[in-house]
Amino acid sequence: MSPIKAKHFVDAELPPAHRAVIPPALRAAYAAVDQLYQQEPLFSVESAIINKGHVVAWAVDRQIERLLTSGQLPYDYRWCPFERPTGKFLQIRLATATLSISQLPLATDVPRHAHFRQNRILSNAPFLDLDGFEDESSISGLPHLILTHGYQELSFAHVGVLHPEPQRFGWIYRTPNLLKEVHVVETDMPAEEAADAEAIVTLRDDISRWVREQDDD
């Protein structure tokens, strides 16, 4: 599958209308942390300033969880343990994919290596152009999307699909910056994208079939 089809998959799993609620939630999280740092003397200590990103991450998790519990993001979610027992991360279950959240210093960066994430992005192989290597791109799990956002300052937010070898090949696809995206809800894909739209429907059906087969085992 080519990167443009990865784009269509992202749009199908997390449509623009649903993505539109994410930027206000991110801004609210960052604003709450800024206010906390201004008002609480505890957060003026150097170690707290250096680790502000951790507090931002907690605030973002909280705001996204509120979108989920309120139904503004109509998806199931759960708190999953890391591979090493050091905590849990928020995993959102989309129709035929999963979504997690990651902070990045730069929008073009890739998340640092983590076993839980690496195991999931291996399922992104169907989005690669692997002519002649059908077995390599077969369905072996739910594709994994990642919501990325800034670290100390909120300057970007993207939803992307990582290459199974991210340190070498980076992103297969990332949305435009959600903070600047014009949110127009379209009812139909353009005519020239009909073939890609059919391919996405087929892929999602294949993934759903794979899930059912795992449940039957």
Image (cartoon, grey):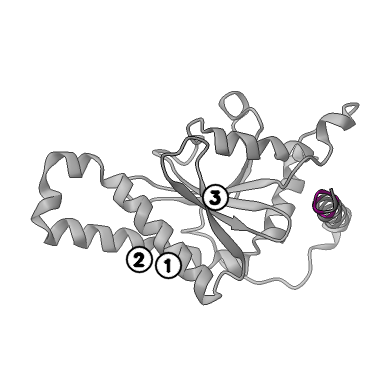
N-term mark: 3 or 2:
2
The residue beneath circle 3 is: 100
Q: Does the image show residue 130?
A: no
Alpha-carbon distance for marks 3 and 1?
Answer: 18 Å
**Label 3 neighbour load within 10 Å: few <14, some 14-19, many 20+:** some
In the orientation shown, which residue stands out farthest toward the bottom? 70
Q: At 54% across and 50% down in the image, what residue appears?
A: 100
- Decide if residue 114 is on the left or right side of residue 205: left
Instruction: Locate residue 45, reporting x and y percent.
Output: 11, 44
Instruction: Locate residue 110, reporting x and y percent.
Output: 51, 35
Q: At 79% across and 64% down in the image, what residue appears?
A: 189
On the image, which quarter does residue 194 sit in?
Answer: bottom right
Q: Secondary structure at mark 3?
A: strand
Q: Which residues are magenta?
A: 211-215
Q: Secondary structure at mark 2?
A: helix
Q: Nearer the viewer, mark 3 or mark 1?
A: 3
Q: Are discs 2 and 1 less than 8 Å apart at CB?
A: yes
**Label 2 neighbour load within 10 Å: few <14, some 14-19, many 20+:** some
- Residue sitting nearer the eye, 32 or 2: 32
Q: Is residue 121 above or below residue 60?
A: above
- Residue sitting nearer the eye, 139 or 7: 139
- Decide if residue 189 is on the left or right side of residue 103: right
- Decide if residue 173 is on the left or right side of residue 194: left
The residue beneath circle 2 is: 28
Find residue 24 and name its label: 1
Instruction: Locate residue 216, reporting x and y percent.
Output: 85, 53
Q: Does the image show residue 16?
A: yes
What's the residue type where badge 2 is placed? Ala
